[in-house]
Amino acid sequence: MVKILKRKEISHGGKIGIQLASIVFAFIFASIFILMTKNNPVSVYFSMFQGAFGTGFRFKETLINAIPLLITALGISLAFKMKFWNIGAEGQIIMGAFGASYFALFHGDLPGIILIPLMFLGGAVCGSIWGLIPGFFRAYFKTNETIFTLLMNYIALNFITYLQYGPWKDPDAYGFPKIARFGRNAVLPNLMGIHIGWIVAIILVAWVYYFLHFTKSGYETAVVGESENTAVYAGMNVKKIILRTIILSGAVCGITGVIQASAVARTLSVNISGGIGYTAIIVAWLSGLNPVIALVTSVLFSAMVQGGNFIQLSHNIPSAVADILQGTILFFVLGNQFFINYRLQRNK
Amino acid sequence: MESFLTASIIAGTPLLLAILGEIITEKSGSLNLGVEGMMLMGAIGGFATAYYTDSALIALLAAMFCGGLGALIFGFITVTLRANQTVTGLALTIFGTGVSNYFGSGFVGKVVPEGVKKSFAIVKIPVLGDIPFVGSFLFTQSTFIYLSYILVIIAGIYLYHTRHGLYLSAIGENPAAADSAGIKVSLYKYVHIAVGGMLCGLSGAFLSLIYVPAWQENLSAGRGWIAVALVIFCKWNPFMTFIGAYLFGGLDIVGFRLQQYDIHVSQYIINMLPYVITISMLIFASVRGKSRGPKSLGLNYFREDR
Amino acid sequence: MDTIIEVRDLEKHFGSVVANKNISFKLKQNKVYALLGENGAGKSTLMNMLSGIYKPDKGEIFLKGEKIIFSSPKDAIKNGIGMIHQHFKLVENKSALDNIILGQYNGFFVNRKKIREKVMGVCEEFGLSIDLDKNIEDMSISEKQTTEIIKVLYRGSKILILDEPTAVLTPQEITNLFRIMNNMREKGCTLIIITHKLHEILEISDEVIIMRKGQFIEDVITSETNEKELTDLMVGESVDLKIERVVVPDGREILHVKDLVVEDRDRIKKLNGVSFHLREGEVLGVAGLAGSGQKELCETLNGVIKATSGDIIYEGDSLKNKTPREIIEKGVSMSFIPEDRLGMGLIAPMSMTDNLILKNYYKQTGLYLDRKDAVIQGERLIRDLQIKTPGIHHPVKQLSGGNIQKILLGRELDTHPHLLITAYATRGLDVQSSHLIYDEINKQKQNNVGVIYVGEDLDVLLELSDRIMVLCDGEITGIVDATATDREELGFLMGGKKLEEIEGAKHG
């Protein structure tokens, strides 16, 4: 019989050791699927790396795809820090894109220097409103936010579909149901070959880090997340803190939508988010809600996707291997928490 | 009208099975967000097996096996390793999507073999199928759909009239009480999480073998998430799944029908309705202060030796 | 009458804490045993071992002469031992019937009719009455308790353990419970009742088992003992702790609590008309068994919970409707050390510095949260209170319980309160650390701070306080001069005897 005992403490090194070990195990487990295609896992992993970083172009693509993951993960981290399980990032991204698109489509003749900030503002506001609705009910009525935010995703998705097939349908698109492309003023400029979304991302990494670790509001967010009782005891206004955190979380996710609409798609469509809202949850979780680590993790996840696409061509292995890898890594990391908190002892 | 209802039932069946599966899972106190992943795993498992064996029965068993396997991964990580249920469920969705696409890539464009098609062909049930109006859409359907009726009824009887079902709902409400009454909480959780997964697997098989029928990427098209939401709509009651699933199935196809009557409401606004209704139910329940779901939903339970 | 249960040399540790040691006794059939002991005496641990929740580290349990090892509560139930916990293990949204038969169905399908007949048979046999179809959430506490009792009897339990059953009942309901217990005894059951109410012990039990500090002290026959003897056995000998009492004369009154009533969510009165005064430079000790209302008193005074009625006047102002932050600003500081030590007041995964700023962080202007002062404060506290910590930036949950308490108290004292409320400040601390805390409190007295000291250790209360207020079941049974009272009197007050009765007995 094995007894489960709670660990009294674990060294920092021990913790990292367990986490690294779990990632290694994940790669080993996933290689089973690669072996099934009669390929050498090591060479396949190497090719994935090549596919993600091998040439300048590929490297850029990886980074471009990492940007929305990163920004969304940052927004999610803010909410998760307070133990508000914001599964609605997908919807907040979509509504952020909507907010930006409004300005791009109907005020597209404004000079870029005015239009783009307006788009960011509109997107952030729409994203926060989208998060605020479930947030309000959680703050005042303790409504379960996991399901609520999830449902909001579907409402957002259907809303855009409605716009795309209806009121915002592009009359010049020969009957295809799509929304018009943005004018030049509404498109984010490039810097060093990548749209300036990367600057926004880096600024946000710094800002979220600063917020969580060095501001009073960040401190309050963490306290409320750990123990609402203690927050009340300390005199904090818990409802206000919950609302504030969600507004920020939704706003940041909304910014992702602005960037995707303005720089990547240059229009609004139902595919504007494409699952980023869910993948970013995993990025945030794996990064331990740490913005700087999220930077690395989002690049790695983007690399996995890029690499997956690449080996489809080079080795004829389904790109789905990237998803399998992502899921496996997550399983192992989730599982390793157990070994960090508990140790096993054999019973005589 | 009958044809609309018939189509609604067909459209609603994948939801029916998935909602039923998730209800059973959630009754044990586990919130498994990996429904989409389990559906896809069952879809490819069922399709591939059907393709190679041309046996409907074996295909269904395979679909259940795949869905259940995915669920067991979730069960192990949350029940034994006590990890966060929300994130584990998401991981299962991603993993399941990946695994199914991986195996499915070899089956794109393939057709369901004849033997299987015949097994699932539309059969009119004698006597019941002759009832005017009702008989045409309820009892003139594929055998798979009859299977789904039976599963709902079995689930309902199980949950409310057998001791295991009653123990299960006690576990979902107050695992400590069940534990002190001598019920093996972890075992029940494992079993019912797995059963929930098997039903989700069946749901996927319906999509790949009957509804589409074929294997494609993103076959489930978000139905798994809808099912999770509709569990609340159905108030965790298996018999309610008939209403929830077919209602949504109907809403899915009603837009086009309304156009025939010259009513122009956007299909997409209609699509929003189930979500809006579910949200309203959520809000209503929490404003009233009474949560209707199993009290321990989403929380991991373990008997602490202090 | 045979011995039905025997325990020999039972021992149970939790880490380095010894909860039970050298427990040996025999229990016979057809008897009611009372288990008496102060908080922390080890009663619950012992009963949890008998009911299969804990496994003994050493020692043996014999049932009807046969050695038994329970690996789970199910084993205990199978062997006829049923426990009725203080916190009911009932499924709220189900009926009494469903709860009673939980885990006990035979056969795959549930035949409610047959089961109902069986349950009603049990009710009749023991003289119990309950509406079987009523949902638990709609029931009164007494009805819930009856459901738990039927649950245990339905499983054929012949040995029943009741944990503080009368704590939540009205006098009439208590009479009813005792009638049921007498019935059960007649029908061949053995009952163990954990209680601290001496008059109830004398009324219902045949024998009393007394525990102290985890050990078995004595087993007396109820008819041959009295309240005084029981109290003496329960509290034991006085220990001279050599705590200096500093006397600060003639402080002005700073706190007046008037008829304070506090109800919890279930409308149970946790505090029922509490009134007292406090002067600056005075230590008012608060004694009482766990659950007498100390927690609610502390939380109401600092604004975490709202009073149902009554008032709290501090420095001329009513605190009744103020927010916790407003109360903190007025110079009231509260630190409550719960049993798990980290429940409120400290955040386990955060560092010491992050915990130190908990109550004053908001005073900083600007966005940036400056932790420099907290670092200096932390280092000073580590020196002054001899706190053992791997580092000021390590999460506090890695520290031992005692050190965590020192941080908490240190933080509170640093706010220079005018009214200091501290509960269980020395819970689990070693002698040296405890004395550090007592010295701090005396220092506060000399700074004209009014101190409310809620404690478990009667010796400490007697030596440290100026006056002692005793709470029992949400009411004040007496406020006495610490120099003019003793353990025995405090014991009586804690057990529910009112001061007037004791005085009357003394002079009568």
Image (tube, coloured by chain):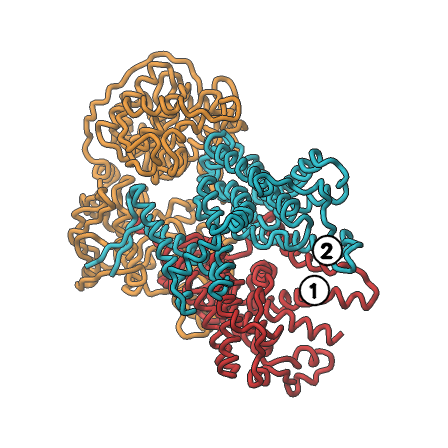
Chain colours: A cyan, B red, C orange
* Residue A118 in picture, x, y percent from top left: 69, 36
Classify residue C385 by image quadrant: top left
Is residue C4 shown to the viewer in this render?
Answer: yes
Front residue (pair C393, C81)? C393
- Circle 2 is placed at which residue position? A178
Is residue C126 shown to the viewer in this render?
Answer: no
| Residue C116 as seen in the image, left or right of residue C51 | right
* Residue A58 in picture, x, y percent from top left: 52, 51
Q: In the image, is residue A14 above or below residue C458?
A: below
Q: Amino acid at mark 1?
A: Leu
- Circle 1 is placed at which residue position? B251
- What chain does badge 1 belong to? B
- Are discs 1 and 2 both within one chain? no
Q: Amino acid at mark 2?
A: Lys
- What chain does badge 2 belong to? A
| Residue A28 as seen in the image, left or right of residue A208 | left
Residue furthest right as drawn: B262
Task: Measure the alpha-carbon separation of dots 1 and 2.
Answer: 23 Å
Residue furthest front as drawn: A55
* Residue C301 in picture, x, y percent from top left: 45, 28
Residue furthest top as drawn: C250
Q: In the image, is residue B244 above or below residue C443?
A: below
Q: Which quarter shows the N terminus of chain C?
A: bottom left
* Residue C407 in picture, x, y percent from top left: 34, 29
Front residue (pair A12, A170)? A170
Q: Secondary structure at mark 2?
A: loop
Q: Residues within 10 Å of mark 1 (few under 14, many from 20)?
A: many
Classify residue B205 by image quadrant: bottom right
The circle drawn on residue C331 is none
Q: Secondary structure at mark 1?
A: helix
